């Protein structure tokens, strides 16, 4: 079971959250979403287990992961190895992570549209969501944009929050196609090899 603490939903935390989800997706974990995120089993299933049954719990430290990726981007990781690591390769790996996280956040989670509008929870605007069927809704043409404090825009933002929440519940492994999964797996393996299995040491 994986538990990630401290990541409430805000656009500023979304990128870190997507990084975490993508790391687990690379290792084919079952992913669920909530304010504190539990992976592999539902909380109620876990609570019903016999007391004498052992469950391994892994706590993932997002700060350390972000520090690692930042050190790849600025070359600090390679410099720490005194020439043993190819600095340019590390920078390129870091940039690839950065670009793909931003791309994924924009494509699936409306990051560019909502990055300047912070709410602590995905259901913060639930009162504005009228429950409309969004299967044929065109988010690109609904006129959503600043100012965000009128009821019409709050409703459109609530729609986006609902879509994001549903994708969290599905998990990236059910949202990404096979080509995207392959792309993430290849990046994961490349990063893991370059960092001497730093990633796989945390996800077993």
Image: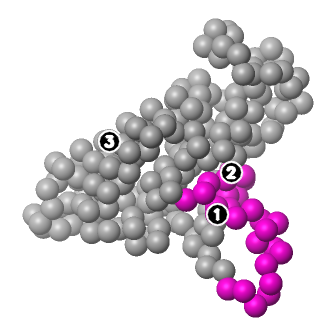
For the record, the magenta segment spans 29-54
Q: Badge 1: few (under 14), some or many (20 or more) residues near its Cα, within 10 Å?
A: few
Nearer mark to the viewer, of 1 and 3? 1
Tags 1 and 3 touching, CB below 8 Å: no
Residue at image mark 3: 96
Residue at image mark 1: 40
Distance from Cα at disc 1 to Cα at disc 3? 28 Å
Position of 86 compared to 47: left or right? left
- Toward the front, the furthest residue is 178
Position above or below: 134 against 170: above
Position above or below: 71 against 156: below
Residue at 47% from the left image edge and 68% from the top image edge: 203
Q: Position of residue 36 (x, y in %)?
A: 70, 58
Residue at 67% from the left image edge and 53% from the top image edge: 32
Counting residues from the start of the chain, the first of labels 2 and 3 encountered is 2
Tags 1 and 2 touching, CB below 8 Å: no
Instruction: Tell me the number on the disc at residue 95.
Output: none
Distance from Cα at disc 1 to Cα at disc 2? 11 Å
Residue at 80% from the left image edge and 84% from the top image edge: 50
Q: Can you tell which quarter of the image residue 108 is in? A: top right
- Toward the left, the furthest residue is 83
Nearer mark to the viewer, of 1 and 2? 1
Does the magenta-highlighted stretch encompass residue 47? yes
Counting residues from the start of the chain, the first of labels 1 and 2 encountered is 2
Q: Position of residue 80 (x, y in %)?
A: 21, 66
Mark 1: secondary structure? loop
Tags 2 and 3 touching, CB below 8 Å: no
Residue at image mark 2: 33
Mark 3: secondary structure? helix
Position above or below: 165 against 39: above
Q: Is residue 119 visible?
A: no
Q: Position of residue 2 (x, y in %)?
A: 61, 66
């Amino acid at each position: 079971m994986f538990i990630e603490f401290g990541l409430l939903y805000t656009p500023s935390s979304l990128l870190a959250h997507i990084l975490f989800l993508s790391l687990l997706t690379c290792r084919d974990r079952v992913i669920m979403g909530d304010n504190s995120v539990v992976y592999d089993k539902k909380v109620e299933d876990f609570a019903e287990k016999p007391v004498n049954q052992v469950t391994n719990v892994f706590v993932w430290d997002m700060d350390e992961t972000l520090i690692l990726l930042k050190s790849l981007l600025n070359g600090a990781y390679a410099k720490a190895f005194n020439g043993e690591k190819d600095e340019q390769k590390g920078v390129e790996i870091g940039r690839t992570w950065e670009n793909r996280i931003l791309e994924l956040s924009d494509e699936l989670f409306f990051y560019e549209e909502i990055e300047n509008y912070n709410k602590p929870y995905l259901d913060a605007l639930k009162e504005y969501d009228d429950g409309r069927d969004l299967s044929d809704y065109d988010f690109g043409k609904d006129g959503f944009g600043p100012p965000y404090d009128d009821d019409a825009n709050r409703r459109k933002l609530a729609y986006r929050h609902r879509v994001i929440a549903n994708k969290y519940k599905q998990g990236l492994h059910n949202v990404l196609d096979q080509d995207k999964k392959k792309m993430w797996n290849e990046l994961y393996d490349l990063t893991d090899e370059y960092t001497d299995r730093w990633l796989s040491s945390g996800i077993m």
